[in-house]
Amino acid sequence: MILSIGDLLLDITIVPDGPLRPDDDRSAKIGVGGGGQAANFCAWAAALGEPVRLVTRVGDDDRGRRLVSDLEAKGVEVCPVWAGEPTGAIAVLVGVDGANAMATQRGASVGLRPDDLVEAWFDGVKLIHVPAYSLFLNPLGQATRAAITLVRDGGGMLSIDLSSVAGLQEYGPTRMAYDLARLKPELLFGTEAEVAAIGIPVEHMAQVPVIKLGSLGCSVFGRLIPAPVVQHVDVTGAGDAFAAAFCSAWLRGATPVAAAERAVIVASEAVTRTGGRPG
């Protein structure tokens, strides 16, 4: 069993047919679907055949119920904590090269508390995957640390994704460096910019630090793993697909290099479609 903890949100994806015009109109493809880094990771892990569980807090509203049902239909076991606050949403603006910019309203998700957790949710968990988003704000950060302790006590491993340069800067690079030193993750995923934002050598951050290089692939222990050349449509969720594929291969006994080779293939497939989840 793989588990992740954090956001389950609504994604509103906007793909204009050209550059936006200030104070004017532009036609676009607009899609609505499930999002949130923890939820997207779980969707990709399930698509890869892994038993996977999401612990999340969502609004007790139509949006939240639909998002939970959709994720369950994709094979994810969802452990929701229903909240009075509304379910959050992300507006994703996709550029002509597939790169994106996001505006996020996290809504109910950040209110998850340690006493919301049920110990049975963590039984049999071999790996907990934690987006750094789940550490940035309390009480979600406190609940996430409690979840990590429950998994560690059961002999499970920890994977962390650094998530966001802006988030790391607001949280504090020194605080994140301290967290990594204390939590000692086996796996760490981050872009070059995210790793640089923390300001300590990457080999001090985790047992296996993996640097994501976008269309170039990734780097593991200084070895470049190239990605296949594909047409980039939308990079939303590509990092989550990468992490899910790496964790899946790692748990099945692959070496870090072999896991990275699998991960870049899955991530490259992910960028050829719109949206952050497998089709």
Image (spheres, rainbow, N blue to C red):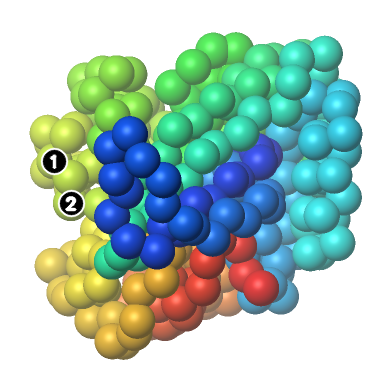
| Up/down of 271 relative to 265, above or below | above
> What is the tally of numbered marks visible in this picture?
2
Residue appearing at x 73%, y 57% in the figure: 52
Q: Residue farthest to the front?
A: 24
Query: Residue 137, how many percent across, how many down?
Result: 49, 17
Is 180 or 49 nearer to us in this picture?
Answer: 49
Residue sitting at 34 percent across and 84 percent down?
Answer: 230
> Is residue 140 at least partly visible in the picture?
yes
Quadrant hosting residue 267: bottom left
> Percent from the top left, x then y, of residue 239?
42, 59
Relative vertical location of residue 248 with respect to residue 18 in this rendering, above or below: below
Q: Horizontally, is 27 left or right of 46 in the view?
A: left
User: Do we see residue 119 in this rendering?
Assistant: no
Looking at the picture, how far across and down is residue 70, in whole percent? 82, 54
The residue sitting at 66% across, 15% down in the picture is: 111
Q: Residue type at mark 1?
A: Ala
Q: Quadrant of residue 59?
A: top right
In terms of secondary structure, where does tag 2 sit?
helix
Q: Which residue is mark 1?
A: 196
Q: Position of residue 143 (x, y in %)?
A: 63, 21
Where does the N terminus fall, quadrant-wise? Answer: bottom right
**Which residue position holds label 2?**
192
Relative to residue 23, is residue 15 drawn left or right? right
Eyeballing the image, is 218 above or below 43? below
Left or right: 242 in relation to 140: left
Q: CA separation, marks 2 and 1?
A: 6 Å
| Circle 2: residue type | Glu
The answer to whether 80 is drawn above or below residue 159 in the figure is: above
Give the crowd class for mark 2: few <14, some 14-19, many >=20 residues within 10 Å: some
Asked if marks 2 and 1 touch (Cβ < 8 Å), the reply is yes
Q: Secondary structure at mark 1?
A: helix
Residue 64, numbered circle: none
